[in-house]
Amino acid sequence: MQERHLYEYAVIRLVPRVERGEYINIGVVLYCKSLKTLDFVFQIKNSRILALFPKVDLEEVESHLLSFQKICQGTPDSGLIGSQDLASRFRWLTARRSTIIQASEIHPGYCQQPQEALDKIFAEMVLM
């Protein structure tokens, strides 16, 4: 039997009007220390978002999410945060903030393969 690994994840939310507190789930970030994994997936469903929040700038939202993705991957253009270790990047991405892109509280779980866990959480929390 394969070993199970502790992971942490947060759901990434679009909160177009922070003062109202209304949001739509658009992504998931997952961190697994033992397997040195940090990954982020997202989906922008234009019709769904615009039906709920017609004044949202979808290009701006996509720009923010691509920045999240770069930080997860630690690409050279991800800035100072992207050069930090995986745990620091995960903590920065999931920190409380008052912007249009916010993270849920952090949730733990156990998995054999982080990608499978990420896909399952994404399907349940974002695609449904």
Image (cartoon, grey):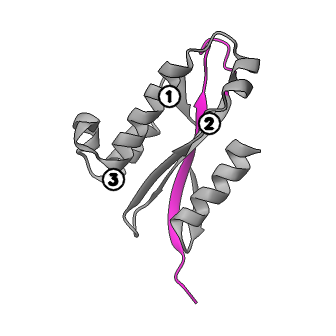
Q: Is residue 48 left or right of residue 91?
A: right
Label 1 belongs to which residue? 62
**Mark 2 → mark 1, Cα distance in angstroms:** 10 Å
Q: Residue at x 35, y 49 (%)?
A: 73
Please state the horizontal and vertical placement of residue 76, each as a whole percent of the image: 22, 42
The picture places residue 83, in percent across and down from the top left corner, at 23, 44
Task: Tell me where the magenta segment starts and ends, as one range.
Answer: 1-23
Q: Can you say whether 5 is above or below 24 in the image? A: below
Give the residue at mark 3: 86
Q: Residue at x 61, y 17 (%)?
A: 16
| Residue 127 falls left or right of residue 80 | right
Residue 90 spot, x, y in % from top left: 40, 46
Specify the amino acid type for callout 3: Leu
Give the answer, above or below, for where 35 lies relative to 66. below
Query: Hey, what amino acid is under mark 2?
Result: Ile
Residue type for callout 1: Glu
Tell me where residue 27 sits by quadrant.
top right
Q: Is residue 2 visible?
A: yes
Q: Residue furthest bottom?
A: 1
Residue that carries the numbered disc 2 in the rendered image? 26
